[in-house]
């Protein structure tokens, strides 16, 4: 008797544990990746002059003193904490601070696709900075499950469940703690990593 056919290995996702310590992260700053730069066209690509020291969310600060910009999108393009290509789209409404949720280990570009009419003689600017959301690495195919310990300056701090973003694999560190730039931030966490058996 002969048997013919195909076999496809099951995909497994075991639960793993990880630990990451970010050494003395700088406080959030709205212009640490690029100082305020003139927006000269509605479709403009900006390139940061500095890269994040560690994976963090990106902030965009738009100034439009004599309102000229009326809408459109601003897209941040780069690499996340797992080495994956990612982008984050912000819908522009008015000038101000736009705070991202995705952690970027590298920001390749910020692409403007705006609407409006320039009337302010060059008063439209954008600065690029970082916030207080930190990326937690889980690998290309991993998924963050839980952060069960957060350490600030080598001391345990109660984990805030609402600060865990499982979709983007991040943790939002309280501003008062991340602003203490001489203190380390550490995370103990669990995650699932897909493994294919063939």
Image (cartoon, grey):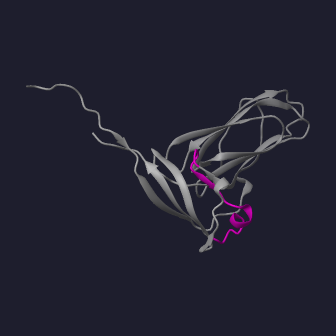
Q: Quadrant of residue 124?
A: top right
Assess whether residue 54 is covered by the magenta stretch.
Answer: no
- Which is the main secondary structure of the residues drawn in magenta? loop
In this rendering, would 169 be left or right of 58?
Answer: left
Number of dots carrying numbers = 0
In this orientation, which residue lies closer to the viewer: 71 or 153?
Answer: 153
Residue at position x 64%, y 66% in the image:
158
Residue 169 placement (x, y as % from top left): 56, 50
In this picture, which residue range is highlighted in magenta? 166-183
- Farthest residue to the right: give it: 66
In this orientation, which residue lies closer to the viewer: 192 or 185?
Answer: 192
- Farthest residue to the left: give it: 1
In this rendering, would 79 be left or right of 197?
Answer: right
Is residue 133 visible in the rendered image? The answer is no
Residue 9 placement (x, y as % from top left): 29, 37
Residue 164 placement (x, y as % from top left): 62, 53
Please state, as top left, top right, bottom left or bottom right, where the C terminus lies in the image: top left
Is residue 20 visible in the rendered image? The answer is yes
| Residue 39 to residue 184: above or below | above
Residue at position x 45%, y 50% in the image:
192
In this orientation, which residue lies closer to the viewer: 196 or 68?
Answer: 196
């Amino acid at each position: 008797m002969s048997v013919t056919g195909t076999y496809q290995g099951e995909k497994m996702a075991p639960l793993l544990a990880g630990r990451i310590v970010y050494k003395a992260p700088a406080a959030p700053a709205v212009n640490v990746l690029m100082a305020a730069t003139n927006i000269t066209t509605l479709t403009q690509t900006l390139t940061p002059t500095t890269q994040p020291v560690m994976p963090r969310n990106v902030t965009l600060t738009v100034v439009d003193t004599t309102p000229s910009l009326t809408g459109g999108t601003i897209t941040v393009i780069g690499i996340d904490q797992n080495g994956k290509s990612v982008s984050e789209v912000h819908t522009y409404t008015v000038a101000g601070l736009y705070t991202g949720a995705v952690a970027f280990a590298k920001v390749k570009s910020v692409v403007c696709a705006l609407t409006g009419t320039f009337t302010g003689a060059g008063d439209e600017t954008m600065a690029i900075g970082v916030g207080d959301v930190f990326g937690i690495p889980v690998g290309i195919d991993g998924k963050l499950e839980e952060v069960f310990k957060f350490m600030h300056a080598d001391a345990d701090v109660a984990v805030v469940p609402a600060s865990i973003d499982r979709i983007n694999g991040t943790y939002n560190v309280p501003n008062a703690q991340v602003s203490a730039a001489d203190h380390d931030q550490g995370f103990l966490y669990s995650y699932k990593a897909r493994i294919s058996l063939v």
